[in-house]
Structures are given as structure tokens and as C-alpha cells.
Image: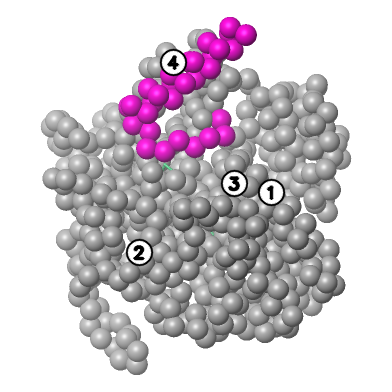
């Protein structure tokens, strides 16, 4: 079956020749018309549209946005904050970058609509420190929007006021985790908070109710308020509404970002047709479908079971290429859609070395609060690096697994799971390669293989 | 500490963005590092005084976030992405090529004081791997040829600076 056409609702103007990131251009393309209409409606109506839409968060967890907004404590009498998570740092993910650099007003409009819907008077955009241009572009865009009365006091004469400020991170991945982000915004180390009791919706920024949403999620909100929640559910598949932006990197002919209706394209169509297949003379070996912490998939393996299709239960028997790209299908086959970062590895890659690369990331980024995470991530890195650069032993796979298995469920934040899943899944699926590594190391490497650690 | 007047006014302005002064710790550190090039020792009590917090509160932040540095570095900061997608496309080679161009090792200042090369983690541009951030600017698909070009440019700018 040929791949469907892209459906660009969020990336509509990304890379469009002549499209610039200033207010005038945005307004020429209908910008801020949705906000103008939204502020004439009741905030509860807007929240209802988002609930109806089934929108799931695009930051990684896929939590329903309307449900999240429904959990906000509105009776506390404290101010409600909204934080835009623009930390984009899950390896393999590169979508928010383009929204912020090329179409910043789309994000600001989505943010303002979300603030109005939730009676938020102060929003912050937490952008990762390595995007200094992005921060300046957003600051300029906010100033333009403020001058045009879309942000700031008495927005469009409604009596409603809301400010947005930019807050820059400083190179720590854990600031993407929402409670770590909140600590960071309070001027502290980004040590995530324990839940309960620190659910942002109740005890977030300055111990006030707080909404944290990803950049892309808030752009979807703008689209939903424009077209209605009902219309949005017609895009994508039930339970996985709207579009998804797939960020494909690694060993394909045409890496890049592609926006499709969720669940309407399979992994095989995405990689073979849209991305042009493997590099010349190579074959696909493995793919990580949703950012580096998602469990790896091995080409050639099969997934079997029963799934709901409408009202029926049907059997499925899929290879990697057959898996529809949405949250639920990827979860069914034991991995996740996460942030949409699809990392492809071909037959030149040795999986021990790829894991060593990933483990170095997690070891560097653990915030260090929880012993299982801090020590476990470090030891997984030490063992895999030793295997590559020092002595590799047949029993290392079992050792790695035992370290990884002791982390999940024993930590404050989901980084514990995130850092153990790569090791667990690489060993479960490529155990042969780990066991055979001491021998494989002695052989010459393929000439086109790259050093990974 | 000798901060430019523009930095001082930005500092006073940014503090007003937050209901709690302590929130301005990261912004102040960024502003000072942009002005001076690193975070000198005296910046820590200075920020603490400005934000009415303890010096330890500032110190623990400086030591947590990789972007803040306590020592001066080369005039240009070359950050090569080390993470998987970039490594798969030759990021380690890119880093080695820069090291060779400037006769230095990552984490060190080059002998002429011109550059510091570092590995950093995923820069959220994996589709155009391998990527390199030089000061504020992102460079994409940095293969051997592009390393050469970028290095020539840096060397040219250095020569021009020395002439004037
Ligand atoms: C270790 C870790 C890193 C994360 N990094 C990011 C990130 O870079 N960007 C992001 O939007 N969400 C990230 N998240 C998810 C956030 O915690 C949060 O769920 C998300 O911002 C909520 O927004 P959404 O509901 O719109 O997706 C991360 C989560 C964890 C556990
Ligand atoms: S799981 Fe890891 S990153 Fe999360 S709080 Fe614990 S030590 Fe920090
Ligand atoms: S891995 Fe290098 S930019 Fe993401």
C-alpha cells in the first residue's frame, strides 16, 4: 500500500518559501484570528473543545490534554500558571525547534488561547539553553504580539490580561521533566519532585496550580479551537486523534520531519517510502520509534495479539514495517510513540556500541537524586563503555540486565524507566550480539561503520 | 565584577519577570556569562545579594547546569553533538577533525586561545546530523569538508582581528 500524503496542520508553513517569522507575515496567513474569536467565548467552552478533541500531549507521555486541564485546582484561590515545555531534549526529537524558529506566533497564539481557557495570567516558555536564537525570536515575537494587544494587559479590550516570559534552560536534559522544569524555573537545581503530592495541577510553580504543556501540544490547541474538537477527532484514528510529526534521523536516505495523521501510516511506509529506505547497499537493523528512551524494535521480529478495531477484537500479526504509527499500536508492540523521534540503525551498527552511546547520555543527564538512577545509569555506561574500549566478557549482558532491572519503579521521576528501557530492550532483542561481542570485537569493523562511543 | 551597563539594566529588568527573585538565578547567570565569558567567583555572592538568597543557592545551580562554566574558555566555543543520531552519521569524526584543525583536545582551550571544543548531548537537530553549535550558531551536516570550511572561517576571523 502506498504511503498516505502528509497532512500538515502544525507544520503548514515550515520551510515555505517566503514565510517569515514576524507578526505581519503571520497575520497575512490568518494569524491571531482564532484568538480574537476565542476571547469572545466562555473559557469552559474552549476546555470542552479540547476535551472533545481527544488531543494527547506531544511531549512524550501522550497524556490527554483536556484531562490534564480538568485536574487543575481552580478552587485554591492561588494564581494558575501555564508553562510551555520548550526544552526539546529527548534524543531523536526535533520538531519544536522548527515551530519556534520559523513560526513562533503559532505557538504564542496557541499559548494565549490556552491561558484564556484556563484563566492563566502568567505564562512562561521554558526553552532549552542551546537555542539562543530561538529565545530571541520568541522574545521578539512576544513583543510584537504585545504591541498588537494579543499579549499583555486588557487583551483585545476584553479586560483579560496575561503575560508571557521566556526562561532559558542551561543544558540539563532533566529540565524537560515537568517537575524538574518547575524547580529550574524557581531558580534551583532541576531535581524532579515526588508525586504525590507535587502534581503540577495542584502544587506546581511556587506551589500554585500549574499546567505544563509541550510546544506542539499548544499548537494543536489552536487548531482545535479554530476547527472544533469534533472536527479534530476526524483526523487520525480513534484514541489517537490529530496529526503526529515524525522526526526521522539516522540511517535513512531522507531524514527529516514529516507530519501525518496519527495511525494512518505504518513504520514501513514512513521509512521506506517517505524517507527513501536504507542507505545504498545497506539494510535496516533496528529502530527506536519514540525518542531514545523508547524500547528498540528489531527488524525481522513479529508482534502478535488481539486488538480492538472499532467494536471488534481482531488478530494482528505484524512485522516492524506493519506497525501503524500511533501511541496505542506502538504501546501494543511493547514500545512507545513518545516524542515522535524515530532513530534508524542499519546493518553497519553494532548494538553494543549503540547502547554504549545511549547509556553515556543517560549517565550524564541523571539529576542524581535517586540512588538507583544515579548509580545504575553510571554503571550501565561504565559496563558498555568497557565492553567497547576495554575487556568485553560473555557475562556482561546478564550483568547489564541486572543493573537495569533494579531501576524502574524505584525512582522519583520517569527518567528511571527512561534510562533502563534501552538496556533492557537492547539485551532482550539483541542478546546474541551482546554475548558475541567479545568475539565480534576481534574481527575488522565494516569500513563504513562510525565510532559511536 | 565589571559588568556592562546594558547587562546591569537587563539584570534589573529580568528580575521583574518573576514573583520570586530567586527564579532569576538562571537568567542572571546567563547574562553574566554572556558579558564576561564565564562565571567568576565573585559573581556568586553578587547574585546572591541581588536576589536575596544565600551564595550556596547560586553555587549549587552553577555546578548543576552544564552550560555554566567557572573558567574562561577559548574565544569561540565549538560544541559537537555526541548523541546517537549524530554519532550514527559521523559525529565522532567531526569532533576529531576539529580537534586536529585547532591542535587541541576536547575540554581544553586551543594553544592559540582561539577555540574550546566540547562534546554536548543531543541538540534537537538530529535530522541534519552531525550538528555543531559554534557560539550561538547551529551548523548542520558537518562532514569533513564542512569542518574545513568552518575552521578556515574561524582562522580568517582570527587573522583579521590580529591585523586590526
Ligand atoms: C526525563 C524526561 C524528559 C522529558 N523531556 C521533555 C521535553 O524535552 N519536552 C517535553 O515537552 N516534554 C518532556 N517530558 C515530558 C514532560 O514531563 C511533560 O509530560 C510534558 O511536557 C507534558 O506536556 P504534554 O502533555 O503537552 O505532552 C519529559 C519527561 C521526562 C520524564
Ligand atoms: S529518576 Fe533519576 S533523574 Fe529522576 S529524580 Fe531520580 S535521579 Fe533524578
Ligand atoms: S543527536 Fe545530535 S542533534 Fe540530536
Closest to the camera, between mark 1 and mark 4, is 1
On the image, the x and y values in percent for residue A429 come to: 24, 56
Say which element carries label 2: loop
Element under label 1? Answer: helix
- Residue underneath mark 3: A134
Front residue of A439 and B116: B116
Ligand 3, image quadrant it occupies: top left
Residue nearest the viewer, comparing A119 with A349: A119
Q: Which residue is mark 2?
A: A335
Q: Quadrant of residue A131?
A: top right
| Above or below, A354 relative to A392 | below
Structural crowding at the residue carrying mark 1, measured as other residues with C-alpha within 10 Å and reported as few (<14), some (14–19) or many (≥20): some
Labels 2 and 1 in the same subunit: yes
Q: Which residues are magenta?
A: B135-164
Q: Which mark is residue B102?
A: 4
Give the image location of residue A377, x and y in percent.
Answer: 44, 44
**Residue matched to label 1:** A140
Amino acid at each position: 500500500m502506498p504511503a498516505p500524503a502528509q497532512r500538515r496542520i502544525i507544520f503548514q508553513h515550515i520551510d515555505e518559501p517566503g514565510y517569515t517569522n514576524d507578526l505581519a507575515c503571520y497575520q497575512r496567513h490568518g494569524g491571531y484570528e482564532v484568538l480574537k474569536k476565542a476571547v469572545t467565548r466562555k473559557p469552559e467552552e474552549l476546555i470542552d473543545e479540547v476535551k472533545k478533541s481527544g488531543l494527547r500531549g506531544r511531549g512524550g507521555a501522550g497524556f490527554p490534554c483536556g484531562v490534564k486541564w480538568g485536574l487543575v485546582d481552580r478552587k485554591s484561590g492561588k494564581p494558575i500558571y501555564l508553562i510551555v515545555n520548550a526544552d526539546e531534549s529527548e534524543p531523536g526529537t526535533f520538531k519544536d525547534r522548527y515551530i519556534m524558529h520559523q513560526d513562533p506566533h503559532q505557538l504564542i497564539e496557541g499559548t494565549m488561547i490556552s491561558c484564556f481557557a484556563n484563566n492563566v495570567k502568567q505564562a512562561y516558555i521554558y526553552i532549552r539553553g542551546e537555542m539562543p536564537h530561538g529565545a530571541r525570536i520568541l522574545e521578539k515575537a512576544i513583543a510584537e504580539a504585545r504591541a498588537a494587544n494579543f499579549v499583555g494587559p486588557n487583551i483585545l479590550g476584553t479586560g483579560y490580561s496575561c503575560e508571557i516570559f521566556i526562561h532559558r534552560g542551561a543544558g540539563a536534559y532533566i529540565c524537560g521533566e515537568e517537575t524538574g522544569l518547575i524547580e529550574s524555573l524557581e531558580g534551583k537545581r532541576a531535581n524532579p519532585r515526588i508525586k504525590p503530592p507535587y502534581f503540577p495541577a495542584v502544587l506546581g510553580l511556587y506551589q500554585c496550580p500549574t499546567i505544563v504543556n509541550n510546544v506542539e501540544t499548544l499548537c494543536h490547541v489552536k487548531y482545535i479551537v479554530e476547527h472544533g474538537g469534533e472536527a479534530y477527532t476526524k483526523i487520525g484514528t480513534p484514541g489517537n486523534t490529530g496529526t503526529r510529526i515524525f522526526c526521522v534521523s539516522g540511517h535513512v536516505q531522507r531524514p527529516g520531519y514529516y507530519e501525518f495523521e496519527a495511525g494512518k501510516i505504518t513504520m514501513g511506509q514512513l521509512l521506506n517510502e517517505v524517507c527513501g529506505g536504507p542507505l545504498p547497499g545497506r539494510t535496516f537493523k533496528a529502530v527506536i520509534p519514540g525518542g531514545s528512551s523508547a524500547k528498540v524494535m528489531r527488524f525481522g521480529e513479529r508482534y502478535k495479539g488481539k486488538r480492538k478495531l472499532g467494536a471488534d477484537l481482531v488478530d494482528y500479526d505484524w512485522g516492524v514495517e506493519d506497525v501503524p504509527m500511533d501511541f496505542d499500536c506502538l504501546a501494543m508492540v511493547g514500545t512507545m510513540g513518545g516524542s515522535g523521534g524515530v532513530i534508524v540503525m542499519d546493518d553497519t551498527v553494532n548494538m553494543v556500541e549503540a547502547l554504549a552511546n545511549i547509556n553515556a547520555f543517560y549517565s550524564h543527564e541523571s539529576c542524581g537524586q535517586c540512588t538507583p538512577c544515579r548509580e545504575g545509569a553510571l554503571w550501565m555506561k561504565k559496563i558498555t563503555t568497557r565492553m567497547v574500549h576495554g575487556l568485553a566478557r560473555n557475562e556482561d549482558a546478564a550483568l547489564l540486565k541486572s543493573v537495569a532491572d533494579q531501576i524502574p519503579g524505584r525512582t522519583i521521576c520517569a527518567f528511571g524507566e527512561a534510562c533502563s528501557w534501552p538496556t533492557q530492550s537492547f539485551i532482550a532483542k539483541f542478546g546474541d550480539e551482546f554475548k558475541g561481542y567479545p568475539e565480534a570485537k576481534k574481527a575488522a569493523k565494516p569500513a563504513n561503520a562510525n565510532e559511536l562511543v | 565584577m565589571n559588568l556592562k551597563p546594558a547587562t546591569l539594566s537587563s539584570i534589573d529588568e529580568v528580575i521583574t519577570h518573576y514573583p520570586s527573585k530567586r527564579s532569576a538565578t538562571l537568567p542572571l547567570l546567563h547574562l553574566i556569562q554572556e558579558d564576561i565569558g564565564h562565571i567568576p567567583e565573585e559573581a556568586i555572592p553578587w547574585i546572591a545579594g541581588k536576589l536575596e538568597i544565600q551564595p550556596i543557592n547560586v553555587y549549587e545551580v552553577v555546578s548543576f547546569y552544564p552550560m555554566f562554566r567557572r573558567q574562561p574558555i577559548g574565544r569561540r566555543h565549538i560544541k559537537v553533538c555526541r548523541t546517537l543520531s549524530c554519532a550514527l552519521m559521523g559525529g565522532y569524526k567531526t569532533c576529531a577533525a576539529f580537534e586536529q584543525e585547532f591542535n587541541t583536545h576536547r575540554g581544553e582551550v586551543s594553544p592559540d586561545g582561539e577555540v574550546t571544543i566540547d562534546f554536548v548531548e543531543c541538540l534537537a537537530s538530529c535530522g541534519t546530523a552531525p550538528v555543531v553549535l559554534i557560539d550561538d550558531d547551529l551548523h548542520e551536516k558537518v562532514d569533513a569538508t564542512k569542518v574545513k570550511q568552518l575552521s578556515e572561517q574561524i582562522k580568517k576571523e582570527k587573522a583579521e582581528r590580529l591585523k586590526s
